[in-house]
Image: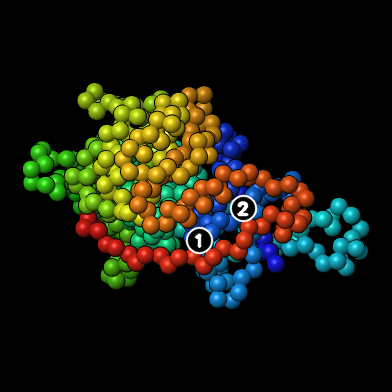
Amino acid sequence: MTESLLVLRAPSANRVFTASAGPLAVREARWVLGAHLGAPVDVHEREIAGVDYLEIRTAAQEEASGSVVDGFLRPLVAQLSSTFAAFEASQPDAAAASAAVEPVGSALPLLRPTPLPGAMRHGSELETTLRYPGKTNEQFTALLLNLAAALSSRRGGVLRGDLAVLDPTCGRGTTLSRALRLGLSPTGADIDAKDIGAYRTFLTTWAKQQHLPHTQSSGRLGLRSPAGGRGAGSRWDLELAADRQAQRAGEVQKLHLLTCDTTRLGEVLPDRSVDALVADLPYGVQHGARTEGWQRSPLDLLEQAIPAWRALLRTGGGMALALNRRTAPYERVHEILGSHGLTVLSGDGAFRHRVDQAIDRDVVLAVPDDHPQLGLLRALAASADEPTSVSAAAATDPEATTTDPPARAEAHEPRERTRHE
């Protein structure tokens, strides 16, 4: 027997992004749900009465393995970038169908609203308030972070709150804000002191307005090697809690904000300390260098930074890179990553979508060559590239396209604290 969960997608404020949101949401859900459940999951677009949904089909499980679906599926669906509401779908019984006045109506499934657990520690204002030219769409940022987390063998940390996230080109912190909303303690770095300062000012104001107990500290970045040369930059640390009681109990989130050249991150952060690396690479359009002396094209930046980024990833870590195909062609990015011990999992154009006339955006997913779950991730990559929509005939016959029941998810690795926490 097949159970069907229908997810109503949230509207996007970006009209251009909306046109590609359906297929992107399907591929995100296949990666995220499949990684946590340990096998490919059947996810498609489906239209019902003129409304677009994501349909997630899971085979009914025995009681022992059902706890895996109940424990992971709904919390993960709640965290997907496009989730607005969820419904359980069922076909009307035969008696009701035969008595229906409108024949067409009998073919439509019955939708029952189903509650999803609260996925966010903080409100949406943390992501949406700060506005500036060139800001990345918040839904796309959430998708990027979810994909990177799914690649990690410690992916369960996104639910526990201990997944180590790094954005090495954080700008004004869109990814960091999403990570904070999820209850994580992220680290971000950027060479642009103006962007770092703007984000720092925003976060401090936001914490005060939300009446969140918090402390902050700042100083120069310390180098891991005494022979490292001149200082690498500065750091600002924010620690916040839900209330005073949580603060006294040590139940806090920590944000580490580094003003430094991303190519030098290996000098200030411990090796193998990052579970999920998320980077929205400069598009080479309006986010290029501001000052001569650190001007780099997107490909130059990637070539110079990837040795440090690779060293920071744990063996079971993963990275999701957003890029402009016009200035960073997929084939060249694939080559650069492969030459530094990384296996690219996403296909050419798997997440491709138009942003504007100058930006043809895509996502590249990669993990270390020795990732302990590489076989599973390759299977998910093949599943994610399948067509994203389902035919009307298949929609009324759930058994026609349902994948095999997912195996019980592998146990998530325990939390590993890093020296910079």
Does residue 106 appear left or right of residue 229 in this picture? Answer: right
- Is residue 348 in view? yes
Q: Secondary structure at mark 1?
A: loop
Does residue 387 appear left or right of residue 121 in this picture? Answer: right
- Is residue 176 in view? no
Q: Nearer the viewer, mark 1 or mark 2?
A: 1
Residue sitting at x 42%, y 49%: 148
- Name the foreground residue: 321 vs 381: 381
Q: Secondary structure at mark 2?
A: strand
* Quarter of the image where the C terminus is located: bottom left
Report how far apart the C-alphas of labels 1 and 2 lie in the structure.
15 Å
Instruction: Give the amino acid type for the residue marked by disc 1 in the picture.
Output: Gly
Neighbourhood count class around disc 2 (C-alpha, 10 Å): few under 14, some 14–19, many 20 upward? many
Residue sitting at x 61%, y 36%: 19
Task: Identify the residue under disc 2.
Answer: 43
Residue 399 sits in which quadrant?
Answer: bottom right
Instruction: Give the amino acid type for the residue marked by disc 2 in the picture.
Output: Val
Q: Position of residue 240 (x, y in %)?
A: 31, 59
Task: Identify the residue under disc 1.
Answer: 38
